[in-house]
Amino acid sequence: MRSTSLRKGENQALLAAPVVLTVSVQGLTADVSALLLGADGKVRSDDDLVFYNHPSQDGVSMAGSAVTVDLVRVPADVDRVVVVVSADPLQPGAVFTRAPLLTITQSAASAMSFIAPDFTSGETVVVLAELYRRNEGWKIRAVGQGYASGLAGLATDYGVDVDPEPIPTPVSLPAQGHPNSSSAGSAVDLSKVERLAPALLPPARQAGNALVDRGISNRRAAVYLILDHDWHMEELYESFAVQAFAERVLALSANLDDDGTVPVVFSSGREPFLEEIRLDNYRGRIGQLHTQVDWGWGNVADAMRRAVGHYQESGAADPAFIVTQVGDEPWDKAEVRSLLQNTASLGVFWLFVGFGRGKLAFYKNLNASASATFSNVAFYDASKNPGSVPDERFYAGLIDAFALWLRR
C-alpha cells in the first residue's frame, strides 16, 4: 500500500467515495467523535455530533476509534466534517502529551497519515482533521489543533447544546518584576468567554495574567485586528495559522474590552474589507471572511486608515490597540510612516506582528533611527508559525510595548 504523510496544515483531494479516518492514541484513554458543520461553522442541530452514544448521522458513522464519511451521502447543507479526539472525562487530569496518529484510507492501494506536533499546554481535546467541500469535490486538511476545554467546551463552540465540563482554574503566573505587577489574577470577569467560547478560556486567562504582570489589568482599550491578504499569505490562511492568530487576539481583547468583539480589516489590493470576529462566531470566521476578499499587494496604509476611521467614528474614550499582521514589506512605505505620525496624538497604538515568508525590515526598523522614532509603534516577530509560540511568550510579545506606552 502506498502511504502519504501529511504535515500540519496540508490538504489533499479526496475521491467521491467513503473515507475512513482511524485514530490511534498512546498514553491515555480517549474518545473519537465527529461534527457535521454548516457554512457558518456550526452544527445544524445537536444530532450533528457523532459519538459513541449517537454513532451515525447523514453519511458519517462511528465504529470504535474509526470515523467513516461517505462523501456522496453527506447532505449539501453540510460544508465540513471535523474529526475530534478527546481525553476520557472519567480520567481526572488526563491530558494529551503525545499527539494521536490519524490514518486516512479510501482504497486498498493508498493511505495517508498525520501526526501533529506533541502537545505541552494541558490539551484535553484535539481537532485532528477536517473534510471540507472545495468546488465540486472534497478535500481533507490536517489540523492538529489542541484545546484545554474538553469535548463539551469544544462542542459548545460549534453550537452543540451540552452541559460543559468544569474547567479547572490554572495557577496564576508569577509576577515578572514589571512596575505595579501583581499575581492576583486578571481584574476582568471572563464569564462571557466561559459561556460563549469556552475553548478560548485558557488563552484568555494567560492574556489576563500577562496584563496583571505588567500592571495594566485595570486598563481598557479598543482592540483592532488588521490581516495581510497578499497572495503569498494563501497557505497561512489555508493552514488555519491566521485563524489561530485571530483567536488569540480575540482572547486578549476579552480582557481589554467587554464587548467580545474585534473589528477585523483585511489588507488587500482593493478597498479594505472590514468585518468583525466575536466570541459567539469566531470558530472558522476568518476562513469564511477571507474568501470574500481579493488577494492583493500589501495595501497596508488603506487598511490602517479604515481602522482609525472606525475607531474615531465609534466615539470610544479608551485608547485603540491596533494589532496589524504583516507578511511582507509594504509598497506604500511613505504613507505608512505618515499615518503613524498623524495618529500619535489620537490615542492609537500600533503593533506590527510579523509572520509569513516575506521580508519585514521596514517594520523591524521603524524605531531604529534616532531622528524618526514613533512612540506609539512596536514590532513583534511571531515567527513563521505563530501557533507554535506558547501562550505566555506570545502574549508577552503582544503587550510588552503596549504596556509601556499605556504607563507613560
Image (spheres, rainbow, N blue to C red):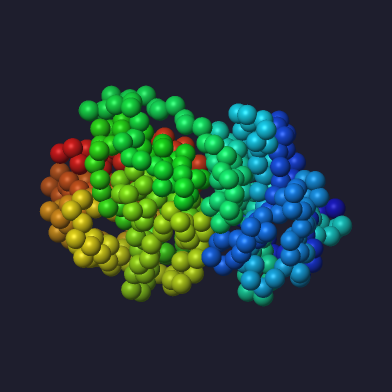
Residue at image x 30%, y 49%? 257
In the image, 404 versus 83, the foreground residue is 83
Residue at image x 68%, y 36%? 88
Q: Position of residue 374 (x, y in %)?
A: 18, 48
Residue at image x 56%, y 57%? 159
Residue 121, relative to residue 177: is it above or below? below
Residue at image x 51%, y 56%? 283
Q: Position of residue 196 (x, y in %)?
A: 46, 51
Q: Position of residue 46 (x, y in %)?
A: 64, 57
Q: Position of residue 173 (x, y in %)?
A: 39, 27
In the image, 115 versus 312, the foreground residue is 312
Q: Is residue 341 visible?
A: no
Q: Quadrant of residue 29?
A: top right
State the count of labels: 0
Quadrant containing the C terminus is: top left
In the image, 118 versus 5, the foreground residue is 118
Q: Is residue 269 visible?
A: yes
Residue 293, relative to residue 327: is it above or below? below
Q: For the view shown, which residue lies furthest in the right direction?
A: 108
